[in-house]
Amino acid sequence: MSKLQNLIAGMIVYLIAVPFSSRAQGYNTSFELFNKTFNLYVDSGIVLRDSVQLTEEYIYASYAELNRNNFHPIVDSLIHYKEQLNLNDWLYYQLIRKVAETLSPKKDNYERYTFYKWFLMVKSGYDAKLTIANNRIIFYVYNKEDIADIPFLMFKNKKYMCLNYHDYEHANLNDVPPVDMIGIPEAKKAFSYKVTRMPDFKPENYKEKRIEFSYKHKAYHFNVKLNPEVDAIFRNYPGVDFESYFNIPLTKETYSSLIPLLKKNVTGMGQKKGVDYLMQFTRYAFLYQDDENNFGKEKRLSPEETLFSKYSDCDDRAALFFYLVKEIYNVPMIALLYPTHITMAVQFDKPVGDPIVYNGKIYSVCDPTPQKQDLRMGKISDKLKQLTYQVVYSYQPIPAFK
């Protein structure tokens, strides 16, 4: 048994055997997350034991009870962990969910679990709100970004996104009126959904996936290391703006198992042929299926999820193609959004095929999604030629200083 397992086993025995009255000073516990051990001191005064009543009065009374007791060790540990691992807000929220689950398991008491999440968020400085409607506790957070496909409401001229919409799958939370929002005045920070850095995971938790495709009559094989925990991180991730979406990175182990080999394979090809290689890789190394048939709803996959998933669609492949070209060639690119399709265009020294002109620069279409036509670089499918598109993201590399 590891030291961690011994500690957890000991704590379980202790919590079962010793009544609350005998451990007034609280207890220590811990769990593993993002390749680190999170150590937690829980003061007995912040353990809510009575049944939850879905009323404002109960929430305010519970807040007052926790606020006058020693909640600081938990919040201090959370903030220290966030700073130590340089966690973006979305990943920090996953940590808060884990702590709330430790304090009050979701399956045992959903309302109390949600209350703890809210309490930890506001004590971390985030402008989070609770509201009660139709006998549901609904959890919102202030956000200033362009977020799609999840409920939100406007309250006092500020936009609040719903953080627990996925727990009410068949309810229309957009119908909930923006009244009786429970918050804390000193909690003012906006929450961001941008993920610019992935956490480290234990190397032994990665699984290898064999990916293969052929280019110019030559077969290429990759044994890519992938971690199932990435899927858990993004399971309830909303539709962020395309700049944020395209710039979600790979984890370190996945990056190391794929990018160096791709760089080796395109060595000596020249830029255009190398980008064509990456386009063909993204187009044909994965099975296509639209999100409605795959997930039953629109869902954008991060580049690492696309590598892991059996199926992917045009959004997923555009993001993966962008990431690969950016890492290997770092050239200007634009994303072209059509009514039912998204594709990419790359700026070369000399354009290829049908030109796409944007802000005075010429780009060449590189469609990373399989079409009925086998489109060469620079070609647009016939069904898209007569349709209008919108440039939803323009990537311009920052020049390196010499």
Image (cartoon, rainbow, N blue to C red):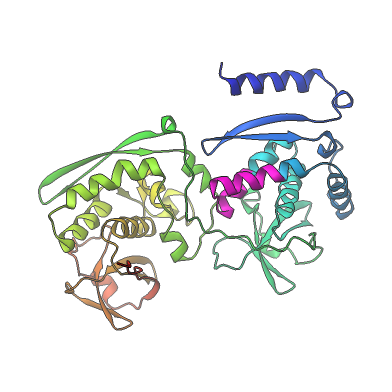
Q: Is residue 167 left or right of residue 354?
A: right
Asked where in the image residue 398 lies, by quadrant, the reply is: bottom left
* The magenta segment: 76-95
Q: Is residue 341 left or right of residue 175?
A: left
Q: Is residue 5 above or below residue 174?
A: above
The location of residue 192, given as percent across then percent down, is: 58, 60
- Camera-nearest residue between 315 and 206: 206
The location of residue 195, given as percent across then percent down, is: 50, 55
Q: Is residue 310 visible?
A: no
Q: Is residue 300 above or below residue 53?
A: below
The location of residue 2, given as percent across then percent down, is: 56, 19
Q: Residue at x 63, y 64 (%)?
A: 143
Furthest-bottom residue in view? 360
Q: Residue at x 86, y 55 (%)?
A: 56
Asked where in the image residue 283 lies, by quadrant, the reply is: bottom left
The location of residue 31, given as percent across then percent down, is: 62, 32
Q: Is residue 153 visible?
A: yes
Q: Is residue 28 left or right of residue 345?
A: right
Queried whether the magenta region covers residue 197, the answer comes back as no
Queried whether the magenta region covers residue 91, the answer comes back as yes
Furthest-front residue in view? 402
Q: Is residue 264 left or right of residue 178?
A: left
- Camera-nearest residue between 162 and 186: 186
Q: Residue at x 19, y 47 (%)?
A: 264
Furthest-left residue in view? 217
Asked where in the image residue 224 lies, by quadrant, the reply is: top left
The secondary structure that dominates the magenta segment is: helix
